[in-house]
Image (cartoon, grey):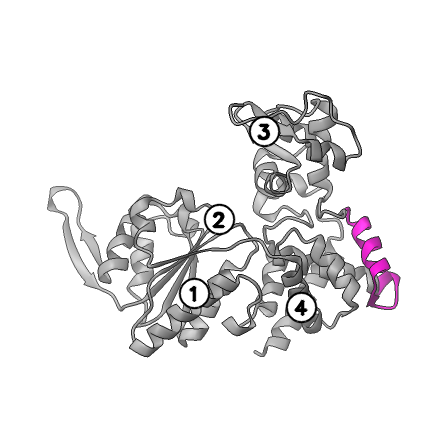
Amino acid sequence: MTGDDALSRAEEAEIARRLADPWPNSADQERQPPETYGAISSPLADSDDREIERALRPKRLDDFVGQARVREQLTLLLHSALRRGSPPDHVLLSGPPGLGKTTIAMIIAAELGAPLRQTSGPAIERSGDLAAVLSTLAEGEVLFIDEIHRLARPAEEMLYLAMEDFRVDIVVGKGPGATAIPLDIAPFTLVGATTRAGLLPAPLRDRFGFTAHLDFYQPDELSVIIKRSAGLLGVRIDDVSVEELALRSRGTPRIANRLLRRVRDYAEVRADGLVTREITRTALELYEVDELGLDRLDRGVLDALVRRFGGGPVGLSTLAVAVGEESETVEVVAEPFLVRHGLLARTPRGRVATAAGWAHLGLTPPTSADTTSLFD
């Protein structure tokens, strides 16, 4: 199947879903897990995002936009391994969701000309599950484990030996009569992805020969990504609109591509299909995405913190109840962006709104607001 065919099928699946359920965030929202939360500015991916991203992803490092230092480091790592004719060191990719960790894993396999085997930490519940995967790897194959910090402890311990010596011990029997049978596995390259590198145990983290941390993208980098995606999706958009989308994408390519698709929908239904700055602003206003990139959930959290609790401090669970969301949704989806932009601060006593947070809502903070210090 060609890239164009995959993109067409992904687009058709998304359109069919929207026609079948045009309001996915209303009655069904309470039973959706945080991973499928439908906020337009959420960095988490739903099933439609994954289908579209699969067709939009660059296939080579030269086509990958942003993360210049990581891209250069990976280029040296992969090219040197190809010259030696041996698998490169194991690679750990860390950073917030939506920045391209899965894309880089696929690019690593493509650059090496090797097959890619994909799985995730939560899917490997027992050491036997991992042994079944490792024992079927071909020489030089790339194994990608997403959310590697969520591996079960027995699987982690098995992975230590596999990464170092390309060997696993299969335990046969139980109790005093149990016997460990060593099983050699083909040399492979492990690519692990995590959004919470601090949860990785030190023995596992130290076995990665190369660790890359992905940072949020600059607006000019997002503009390049949006233009490329617009070309693949057949969206007619002017440069001013591209810049407007880039500024509201929270430094995250996944959000940039999602906003582009929503603006495209608006332009096709309410206009002649050409995305202009006026169309872009009107569409984003309809989807409740403001100039900073805050959506309904972000503003709801900030508004509740300021208007209901006087700017805080207030606990996470109380704040989540105030906006009618799960604590995990508020913590994972809304808080990181609000903290990064200095609109909200986390303190040992709870969440507090900063002076910038008050100003964003058009309010004047009391004299006691934004007085958090190192010792609070």
**Element class at badge 2:** loop
Residue 299's place in the image compared with 305, above or below, is: below
Find residue 229 and name its label. Answer: 4
Q: Say whether residue 22 is magenta.
A: no
The answer to whether residue 271 of the structure is visible from this angle is yes
Q: Which residue is mark 2?
A: 195
Give the residue displayed 66% in from the left and 58% down from the top. Answer: 219
Q: CA distance from mark 3 to mark 1?
A: 39 Å
**Element class at badge 4:** helix
Q: Earlier in the sequence, mark 3 or mark 1?
A: 1
In the rendered view of the protein, which quadrant contains the N terminus? Answer: bottom right
Give the residue displayed 40% in from the left and 47% down from the top. Answer: 149
Disc 4 marks a residue whose amino acid type is Ser
Q: Which residue is mark 3?
A: 316
Q: Residues within 10 Å of mark 1 (few under 14, many from 20)?
A: few
Q: Position of residue 279 (x, y in %)?
A: 84, 59
Q: Which residue is mark 1?
A: 73
In the rendered view of the protein, which quadrant contains the C terminus? Answer: top right
Residue 149 shown left or right of residue 231 in the figure: left
Q: CA distance from mark 2 to mark 4?
A: 25 Å
Q: Earlier in the sequence, mark 3 or mark 2?
A: 2
Residue 97 shown left or right of residue 167 in the figure: right
Disc 3 marks a residue whose amino acid type is Leu
Q: Nearer the viewer, residue 122 or 245?
A: 245
Q: Earlier in the sequence, mark 3 or mark 4?
A: 4
Q: Earlier in the sequence, mark 4 or mark 1?
A: 1
Q: Position of residue 59 (x, y in %)?
A: 53, 73
Q: Position of residue 10 (x, y in %)?
A: 64, 67
Q: Earlier in the sequence, mark 2 or mark 4?
A: 2
